[in-house]
Amino acid sequence: MKFKFVFPTLKKISAYGRGLLSTLGIIACSFALNTANAADSVNSTGLAVTDDTVTVGILHSVTGTMAISETGSVQAEKLAIKQINEMGGVLGRKIKYIQEDGASDWPTFAEKAKKLLVRDKVAAVFGCWTSASRKAVLPVFEQYNGMLYYPTFYEGLEQSPNVIYTGQEATQQIIAGIDWVVEKKGAKTFYLLGSDYIWPRTSNKIARKHIEKLGLKVVGEQYYPLGHTQFNSVINKIKLRKPDVIYAIVVGGSNVAFYKQLKAAGIDLRKEKPLLLTISVTEDEILGIGGENIEGAYAAMKYFQSLDNPNNKAFVKAFKEEYGENIVIGDVTQAAYLGPWLWKAAVEKAGSFDIDKVREASPGIELTTAPEGYVKIHPNHHLWSKTRVGLAQRDGQYKVVYETEELMEPDPFPEGYQ
Amino acid sequence: MFSEYTSSELVSIFAMQGFAGLILFSVFVLMALGLAIIFGQMGVINMAHGEFMILGAYMTYLTSNIFSNYLPGFYGIYFFIAMIVAFLAAGSLGALMEFSIIRHLYKRPLDTLLATWGISLIMQQTFRSVFGAREVGVTIPDWMMGSVPLTEMVEIPINGIFVMCLTVVISVSVYFLMYKSRFGGQVRAVVQNRPMAGAVGINTEKVDRVTFGLGCGIAGVAGSAFTMIGSTGPTAGQLYIVDTFLVVVFGGASSLLGTIASAFTISQAQSTMEFFLSGSMAKVLTLLTVVIILMLRPQGLFSLKIRK
């Protein structure tokens, strides 16, 4: 097309000039053809990819009750995208993002996911936080064949070809943590406690199975509605049962009430009698709880802000430069940060933005630059990662006291635990 | 289920459980008093009640920061200043809200429900924009945390005693204000017959504004006190609103004494059941009981005897 347009104007020019310009014209034309071919070959399904940009979606709640938790993930994903662009982008294309607000409302999540996939034709979506929001968008991603990078540690029991789970499934967080308190702290009895919805209940089920398999005893199991703020009765029950370990999976605003009341009731976690092990309190939550109220508790996670490795130091530094010195980084924030990097690696391995090719390329993708250390995508779309135990400090940070030697294999459908 | 415990353990557990119930009772009364004044005396359903509480909590957070930065020597007593700040902030915002919006809607009570709900959403987003979406941690002076050990098993949380004392002080003040002062007489006159009250020279608009401000101010103080036991975030107010309405409606909307009686009933029932059943089950049973009692007695536990 371009050649035909250029050619008639050439006729008016001298023979010598004509020869030179037409050569240039042919070069220009073939260059244009080449890039057109290139755009086709990396994008055969009509995604929002141009010669120099590729568009992705970010889908989190920035309003409503979940905004408390999801803010960190949005920040991490934007930082990763910015850093990737500074390094030259993905397949030579800068990443642009469209951010949508799920507004802590699950049907809204589904609607916005559909908008991102159908109208914006984004190449990937980084988003969701609660299991409920993920379950709401799952049919949309499967119907329109999108790719979701989901950052939160969750209960497992799911494996979709359209989702890469960058957080831990339950066994990766629970088993190693319990093994550690049993071996190192000599724990014999456990009191399980949680907020009343699917993640704490499934996690405690796995914990109970594992505890009983070790021949130890669960002396109590209690659930409280989301948002519950009065824990005095259960604290009395705990005092009466005298467990070695309180295994707490309380979430959201309830957390603050629980730890403040625990301290007020005279249970000093620093004495480790009883010892408290949680899988639901990251550095983010400690901001609200206050370091002085949770000092001495243990948490089993895969990432702590205080991890001592060069990747993490660079990550924490970049995060603070971007969002201020006082910002804290929790487990999920780090997992969200992995999303864009894993996607970039998969796209580059596939040499294409096509969802099907990215999916095919994903298993086996390694990331040696992850702040948590080394991660690798398992064929079941979850990540191999280590489990670590941290001891909460007064300043709101965790001190890492234990990490598994090997990467834990993700096992979203643990046998005998369902 | 008690066979595995010694009798001294049982005694101490009952003591602590009784105390837990009393703390819950104080918390309920504190939450509900402000709403009871506004709902009961003015008939306005204030859906933004929880947000006024959180406003008080954020004021406490600000005061605590100011004290730790500029007056570290007085940090131990900042909480009392914070409660006054919270009262003034929530009270004046409440009066402003009454002046700008609510007073135009007195003849349309259902619309006040929508209007105050809208205000609650606006306030939530404002908190989020100003203080950030994350929860903030309010540091409580050391002397207010911790507990007094009575025996080896029985420990009395200091913040619980604090909330109880605060509840007594505020309830008694509200009682005197409402039933023994000239202002209280005016409020009750306006509630009973607005045109007549106006005719005898009571400035009914001013009475409305002050009453509304008072209710919101008490919510602010409650929010300030709850930083000791709960979370402070943009949407934390939602955690309290259901319990608050439950207490007020169950008690009989127009009776302050009813509010206190209902807070006592619900808190004792809930804390006892929480001990024997799971937390969620206790909540279900409490709500179920309240529903049944309200079906039999729609006007609530206490109601004014009026000529219909």
Image (cartoon, rainbow, N blue to C red):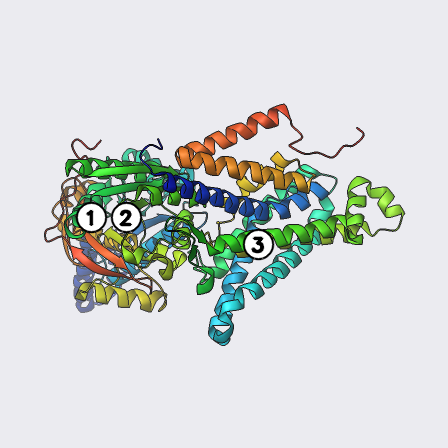
Q: Is residue B291 visible?
A: yes
> Given this view, does label 3 or label 1 mark the residue nearer the observer?
3
Q: Percent x, y for residue B125?
A: 51, 53
Q: Image quadrant of residue A143? A: top left
> Given this view, does label 3 or label 2 mark the residue nearer the observer?
3
Q: Percent x, y for residue A20?
A: 17, 66
Figure check: A42 above or below A321? above
Check if mark 3's residue and mark 2's residue have beta carbons within 8 Å. Answer: no
Q: Image quadrant of residue B274? A: top left
Which label's residue is closer to the chain start, 1 or 2? 1
Check if mark 1's residue and mark 2's residue have beta carbons within 8 Å. Answer: yes
Per the image, the residue denoted by label 2 is: A279
The quadrant of the picture occupied by the C terminus of chain A is: top left
Per the image, the residue denoted by label 3 is: B165
Secondary element type, mark 3 = helix
Figure check: B3 above or below A379? above
Cα gap from disc 3 to disc 1, whole angstroms: 42 Å
Residue at point 32%, 67% (across, down): A320
Q: Percent x, y for residue A171?
A: 20, 41
For the residue carrying disc 3, how many other residues have a C-alpha within 10 Å: few (<14), some (14-19), or many (20+)? few
